[in-house]
Image (cartoon, grey):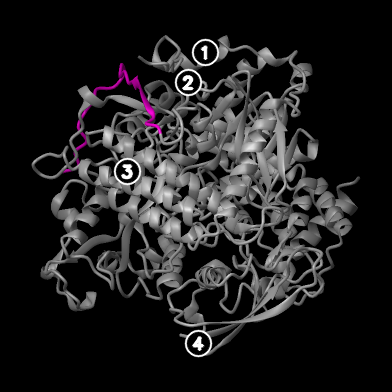
Amino acid sequence: MNIKLKIWRQKNAQAKGKFENYSLEDVSPEMGFLEMLDYLNQKLIKSGGEPVAYEHDCREGICGSCGMYINGRPHGPEAKTTTCELRMRSFKDGDTITIEPFRSRMFPIIKDLLIDRTAFEKILIAGGFISADTGSAPEANSILVCKKHADKAFDMATCIGCGACVAACKNSSAMLFVSAKINQYALLPQGKIEAPERVKKMVAKMDELGFGSCSNTYACEAECPKGISVSAIAKMNREFLHAKLIAED
Amino acid sequence: MTKLNAKIPSGPLSEKWSNYKNSLRLVNPANKKRIDVIVIGTGLSGASASSTLGEMGYNVKTFCYQDTPRRAHSVAAQGGINAAKNYKNDGDSVFRLFYDMIKGGDFRAREANVYRAAEVSNDVIDHYVALGVPFARDYSGYIDNRSFGGVQVSRTFYAKGQTGQQCVLGTYSSLLRQVNKGTVKLYARRDVLDIVIVNGKARGVITRNLVTGEIERHSAHAVVLATGGYGTVYYLSTLAVNSNASAAWAAYKKGAFFGNPSFVQIHPTSIPVLNDFQSKLTLMSESLRNDGRVWVPKQKGDKRIPKDIPEEERDYYLERRYPAFGNLVPRDVASRAAKERCDAGYGVGPTGLSVYLDFKDAINKQGQKAIENKYGNLFDMYEKISGENPYKTPMRIYPAGHYTMGGLWVDYNLMTTVPGLYAIGESNFSDHGANRLGAGSLMQCSCDGFFILPYTISDYLADDIRTGKIPVDTPEFDDAEKSIKEKIQRILSVNGKDTPLDYHKRLGKIMWDYCGMVRNEEGLKKAIGLLSDLKVDFWNNIKVAGKDNELNLELEKALRVADFIELAKLMCIDALNRKESCGAHFREESQTENGEARRQDEAYSFVAAWEHKGDDVEPELHKELLVFENVELKERSYK
């Protein structure tokens, strides 16, 4: 199939970016979306041009590196699919595909489609952990965890930190990302002790960095490639209130 | 003849590690603050070592090429992590886990190291649970285990098909806790391009800041490589596409011996190559072979769709050849059998390079719901990639390069032949012999990083309490930086016609054809010649777009491919030298009448450790003889 591409090009963080148009022939439907970009880059390099910079690594939907706006949606048209899992069979011959970096003031552009997501890490550094030193752990089965809670904790823990939730949100809110981590630990007995402190520290850091608030549009849930539910946000709010009102006594 | 000293402690196998730990020197808390350690890589081994060393009070500087440590490729491990807990009361023990690893590795691993890993495996599970890793549980709240990789006990801890991801996130959280405390400083988006040696000891690294292109100097009292494997030497593999061997290769060139470089595990169940542009092969967990049956048509070149091929015209070749184990034979056996059928013209799919993995019988017997519960996420993943529904039509699979048992040679302390330079996790050669058991890699990485290296490195660092900061304005750092800058300028100035991707593909084809699942003398000699030519061609015709002082993904690739081409040659030299078949290394000249692998213990019961003698000079082989005092060497048979 033949396709047309409209890609955001920006030399570096300071430069002013703009869309450039390209056309590609002989794209096969089995190609991965990123393989299509590799194909474009090979052509650009061989004709003396600059290849399009984009982030990627595992190419199987688990590392969370990739992520771009494809026709206005984070990770493109398919549900629960990362950019690297997307195949060209999701598009038609003659299509024009618009490709941009994740658009959020919280994720500054480094080059072309490549962005800086270190703000996520700063929130986790503030408290996204259980404080257990190596060597201090008790026998694993001395901590029993009810299966329902263990399974829910797992669902929360499947977040790959790609940032699609923030990119999808008109407020650039990180509530889905933060709540997933808060909930994972709050659901487990070994994480409960620090839960009030954890939620306060992580929420404070999230606010300090300038992430926006949640206004319940559910765009984050719709675009999350791992299908993490917005119910996590409600639970985080409950954890937060509990920490502020009750646990302080 | 040998310069190798594995430093294996004396005494009975089961007491070696505890006695040895008691003899190791300690560094007191006040002195730890005066000591710096560099850790390269943030997968399970690197992140666990960094966080544990940070907790102990050392100043840790941790580097990764990704934008954040959480993306390191341990994240992609699916099946699980082994430990000798014996929670299922099925007779498991530290000794049995040790024995299974030694046997699975086809008697080419070091007894003492493997036993130690089995011994500390239980501590690893305890620690992951404490960190909040959500392992699968029973309704009673106890942890569940499953059988994995064809062993007879259920010792594998798992979190659905995402065990690696969950262990990485647990380890990453403890790493960030140390960043919070200020004991670990993170340097993300850095490629480590050289190791700096001062007075014979590893004292620092040269890195390239991947955003600014700046060449940086970092010093420390010891350097730990946790850089993973080199499976991307095949271009197409199950690894993350940016995984590379450059730091390990720099270490080799600075005097660290490379152990068993040719030992590579080819995983039997990957989604096959679909087109020429393919950049990556996606693994389908081998747990699928518990319910899937592998077959090809009995008739050569049969182009009918699978459901039109009647039962009697199907060849379930694993069940035919290996009646005792059937579809559950070990990875190397399953891989070679698939290749044999495809090479003989019975392969299926558009390229003829794949075989069927069929769930029809399992679905008929257990119902679709049961299969969905077990493998739902894998079936979805398969459908996303191939566009075919595996509930309706068999999956197509083919082997793919996966895990490198070979790596930097280390002694019992996990130290390389360069004093102060350590290698942990997949980057070392130590625990998996010639073939790794399923769910063994997460285990080894975690054991090394959490519970082994922190003890052994302290013994070494005890000599450095009065050394003071290692300065970076010394001739050793000047020279290392200068040579890296020259290499970068050289690679940018060629301005030829072919891209790093072109070369990587060519390299991958040579390695897959001649140093893949099956090797022979003629092919390996041919490959060595082709690789020498490829190296010359690369340095005369490489085209790298962009400049050095900016984010330049092409330059990163070119530097990695240049190193891979050299490493590939060492792999072939090692494979040529080892004239036996063992584990994943199958030499055609060494097989039984039935076409099975024939190990040659008298001649090859050693670790091949290669010493760099200069560019384009033959490396020197050192042998570490393997002594087996606790197990009897047996032939692996799955008939």
Q: Is residue B139 visible?
A: no
- Inspect the image, locate mark 1, and give the three-letter code of the amino acid beneath it: Tyr
Which residue corresponds to mark 2? B412
Q: Label 2 crowding class (10 Å Cα cut-off): few <14, some 14-19, many 20+? A: many
The chain holding disc 1 is: B
The disc label shown at residue A92, or none: 4
Residue depicted at x 79% and y 40%: B180
* Distance Cα–Cα, label 1 vs label 2: 10 Å
Q: Position of B40 compared to B97: left or right?
A: right
Which residue corresponds to mark 1? B20
Give the camera-side residue of A137 and B538: B538
Looking at the picture, does residue B439 appear above or below residue B120? below
- Secondary element at image label 4: loop
Q: Are marks 1 and 3 in contact (CB under 8 Å)?
A: no
Residue depicted at x 42% and y 33%: B86
* Distance Cα–Cα, label 1 vs label 3: 42 Å
- Inspect the image, locate mark 3, and give the three-letter code of the amino acid beneath it: Ile
- Inspect the image, locate mark 2, and give the three-letter code of the amino acid beneath it: Tyr
Residue depicted at x 52% and y 21%: B413
* Distance Cα–Cα, label 2 vs label 3: 32 Å
